[in-house]
Amino acid sequence: METDVRATAPRYFWDTWADTVPVGNLYVVFLLLSLADLVATVRQVQATVITEGNPLALWALHVGGAVGITAYKVCLVGVILGALAVVDRTRPRLARVVLLAACILMGIIALRQLGIMSVFALLRH
């Protein structure tokens, strides 16, 4: 009995990409984008430009101020990265694709925060 051993073309971009991108780089990018979000959120809330939209984060902000929101966001990022590390052990491609999606989302959030800060700075002058 003969089996067909011809190589097939990758069906999706992550079929080859997930094997080549070091997952550590994605963790660092996610951490940096999360830090940018934290700094922007604290500055904007302290300047009363915005209020936090997440009810749990808003509670942490009211209870602990800047320290409370920082603790909340650090715990949230820790849970996300911890869950992805567990998934990475058994399904590394899935973990990398989810981490890439999280980085894209955090990038969009960081750009939004930067836009809000820019508009506020222009209105103040």
Image: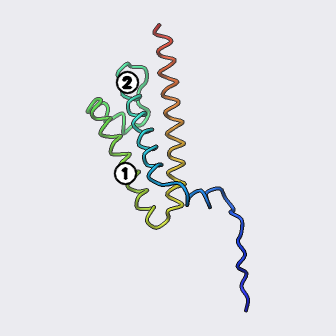
Instruction: From the viewer's side, name the closer residue of 97 and 42.
Output: 97
Q: In which quarter of the image is the N terminus?
A: bottom right
Mark 2: which amino acid?
Arg
Residue 88: percent from left, percent from top: 45, 61
Residue appearing at x 43%, y 24% in the figure? 50
Nearest to the observer: residue 105 or residue 24: 24
Q: In this view, does 86 lie above or below 76?
A: below
State the SS at label 1. helix
Residue at 43% in and 65% down: 89
**Residue type (three-letter) at the residue carrying disc 1:** Val
Is 100 placed above or below 113 here?
A: below
Q: Which of 6 and 74 is in front in this view?
A: 6
From the image, tell me which residue sits under label 1: 79
Marks 1 and 2, how far apart at CA: 24 Å
102 with respect to 66 (left or right): right
Tell me which residue sits at (50%, 12%) in the image.
122
Picture coordinates of residue 15, whole percent (x, y): 62, 61
Mark 1 or mark 2: which comes first in sequence? 2
Residue at the image point whose x is 33% and y is 45% from the top: 75
Q: In which quarter of the image is residue 6?
A: bottom right
Mark 2 lies on residue: 43
